[in-house]
Image (tube, rainbow, N blue to C red):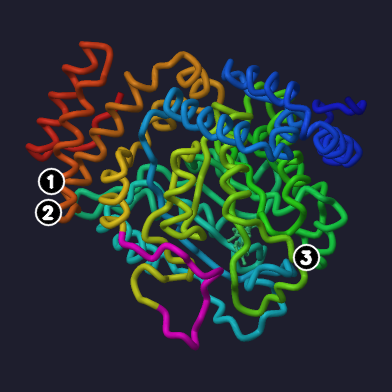
């Protein structure tokens, strides 16, 4: 192993370029060393994760039998730790004002023909009401970086507004935040505002490419961006979400970098990332695709998902509507734990579909189904769509959530919570067909709760939800 320090607080030391190159070389030299590949897979069977180097060997290995074993193991780990639940969320775009120059993003400051929009608090009420009326309980708020138009005070005000809206039986119970890297002080304010996960995509871990892809604006600073999660944790945020924008750089480099980042968080803060997102670059307004021609096939994408599940078993994995129904169907069994549904990537898009000439969307969505269609589809595939937000509301964040996962308490806790929130969805928002499938699913899944006491209470709560009560949780 190259001599580097995952505990260092300096970006270039914990995401060590030489160590990544050495890992990729090691992986390349050993990709046909099936004895080593089998040893790594045996270690992965213990469900304690893998190092970036070990996982890189698996990523490089092209032996069909071993790949099959990777997929089966990823599926089994997902079932053991997460069961068949899939948590639902939607993004809410607050503002597309942005001072950065990210070459892959249509929000870049030089794009003069995109309609710049920022939601007022009244507009937020409308957007959130529309989201509640679909059945959403969990949002990820998104904004460009612009200290004048979208200062932290604006973001905090929006969060307050979102939590305050109670329309019919609707409520947004968890707001995750995806905004640009900021200061410890601002992270503390976000924590105080009651956010769930702070999400920040690294885009690329390759410093040189990073600087070229972010030529202007505050985001140009690689170290400030890469060290953001440490500042977020210093500011008291326990749950952070990592991600790479696949397609910008070579995927093997990104994969190793992503796992090194997870190892760093574990080494320094004692808890790894709460989630990992795997966005792939999409067509968007005013971007030149030749500037980052590293797109990955659906098969490689699936392998990356499976290996993330194996390498960091306790970390949730998120797939957005950047992916089509068929790709989502392919990766769901490989370890995905959260998906978005019925997403709009334009500012104000939930209330009014945008006229073509006003295009403010961030990227094209590949899954355009309604939330009801997504919920119906998931259940037909044997998954439980979950609208649960209990953990963070019960203070089970950071290592407390991880220990729930590690102690196998998911079936006594997350499982009934998923069923109760699904029941709420069926009562308040589902179509008749979805409701029918859902009722049968709940009946069947309640029987799987191992602790008889918990099972009895869950039955009672489901009964009470049918009678009009809401918001039970374990
Ligand atoms: N502006 C914030 C920042 O600087 O991190 C984050 C919000 S941005 C709305 C969310 C993410 O969208 C970005 O981090 C980037 O990975 C992704 N994104 C940007 N352009 C994209 C594109 N053309 N296709 C797919 N995803 C894109």
In space, the residues marked 2 and 1 are separated at their CA atoms by: 6 Å
Q: Main secondary structure of the magenta part?
A: loop
SS class, disc 2: helix
Q: Please say if 253 is above or below 404.
A: below
Give how far across and how far down residue 70 sits, in percent: 58, 32
SS class, disc 1: helix
Q: Earlier in the sequence, mark 3 or mark 2?
A: 3
From the image, which quarter does the N terminus lie in?
top right
Which residue is at 43% across, 66% downward? 344
Q: Is mark 3 within 8 Å of ligand 1?
A: no
The residue tagged 2 is 432
Q: Residue furthest left?
A: 467
Which residue is at 68% across, 22% downward? 38
Kindly indicate whether the residue at mark 2 contacts the one at mark 3 (C-beta within 8 angstroms).
Answer: no
Kindly indicate whether the residue at mark 1 contacts the one at mark 2 (C-beta within 8 angstroms).
Answer: yes
Between 98 and 111, the residue placed more toward the observer is: 111
Instruction: Inspect the magenta stretch and tell me whether residue 361 lies in it.
Output: yes
**Residue range highlighted in magenta:** 354-370
Crowding at dot 2, Cα within 10 Å, few <14 / some 14-19 / many 20+, comes out as few
């Amino acid at each position: 192993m190259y001599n580097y320090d995952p505990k260092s607080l300096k970006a270039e030391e914990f995401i060590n370029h030489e160590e990544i190159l050495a890992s990729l070389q090691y992986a390349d030299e050993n990709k046909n060393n099936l004895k080593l590949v089998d040893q790594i897979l045996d270690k992965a069977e213990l469900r304690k994760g893998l190092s970036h180097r070990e996982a890189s060997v698996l990523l490089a290995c092209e032996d069909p039998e071993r790949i099959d074993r990777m997929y089966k193991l990823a599926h089994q780990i997902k079932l053991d730790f997460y069961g068949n639940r899939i948590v639902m969320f939607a993004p809410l775009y607050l503002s597309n004002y942005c001072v950065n120059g990210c070459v892959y993003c249509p929000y870049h400051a030089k794009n003069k023909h995109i309609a710049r929009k920022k939601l007022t608090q009244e507009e937020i009420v409308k957007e959130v009401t529309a989201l509640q009326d679909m059945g959403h309980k969990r949002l990820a708020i998104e904004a460009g970086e612009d200290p004048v138009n979208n200062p932290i005070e604006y973001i905090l005000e929006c969060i307050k507004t979102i939590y305050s809206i109670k329309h019919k039986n609707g409520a947004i119970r968890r707001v995750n935040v995806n905004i640009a890297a900021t200061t410890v002080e601002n992270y503390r304010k976000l924590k105080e505002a009651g956010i769930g996960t702070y999400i920040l995509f690294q885009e690329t871990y390759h410093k040189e490419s990073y600087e070229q892809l972010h030529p202007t604006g505050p985001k140009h600073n690689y170290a400030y961006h890469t060290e953001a999660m440490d500042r977020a944790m210093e500011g008291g945020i326990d749950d952070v979400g990592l991600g790479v924008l696949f397609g910008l750089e070579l995927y093997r480099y990104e994969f190793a970098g992503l796992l090194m980042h997870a190892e760093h968080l574990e080494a320094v803060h004692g808890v790894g990332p709460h989630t990992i997102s795997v966005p792939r670059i999409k067509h968007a307004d005013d971007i030149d695709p030749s500037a980052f021609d590293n797109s990955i096939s659906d098969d490689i994408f699936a392998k990356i998902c499976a290996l993330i599940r194996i390498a960091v078993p306790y970390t949730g994995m998120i797939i957005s509507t950047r992916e089509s129904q068929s790709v989502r169907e392919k990766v769901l069994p490989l370890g995905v734990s959260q998906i978005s549904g019925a997403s709009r990537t334009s500012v104000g898009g939930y209330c009014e579909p945008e006229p073509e000439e006003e295009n403010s969307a961030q990227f094209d969505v590949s899954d355009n189904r309604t939330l009801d269609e997504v919920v119906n589809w998931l259940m037909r595939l044997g998954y439980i769509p979950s609208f649960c937000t209990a953990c963070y509301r019960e203070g089970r964040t950071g290592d407390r959530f991880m220990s729930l996962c590690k102690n196998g308490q998911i079936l006594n806790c997350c499982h009934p919570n998923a069923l109760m929130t699904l029941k709420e969805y069926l009562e308040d928002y589902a179509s008749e067909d979805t409701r029918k499938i859902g009722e049968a699913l709940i009946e069947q899944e309640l029987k799987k709760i191992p602790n008889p006491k918990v099972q009895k209470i869950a039955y009672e709560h489901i009964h009470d939800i049918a009678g009009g009560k809401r918001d039970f949780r374990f």
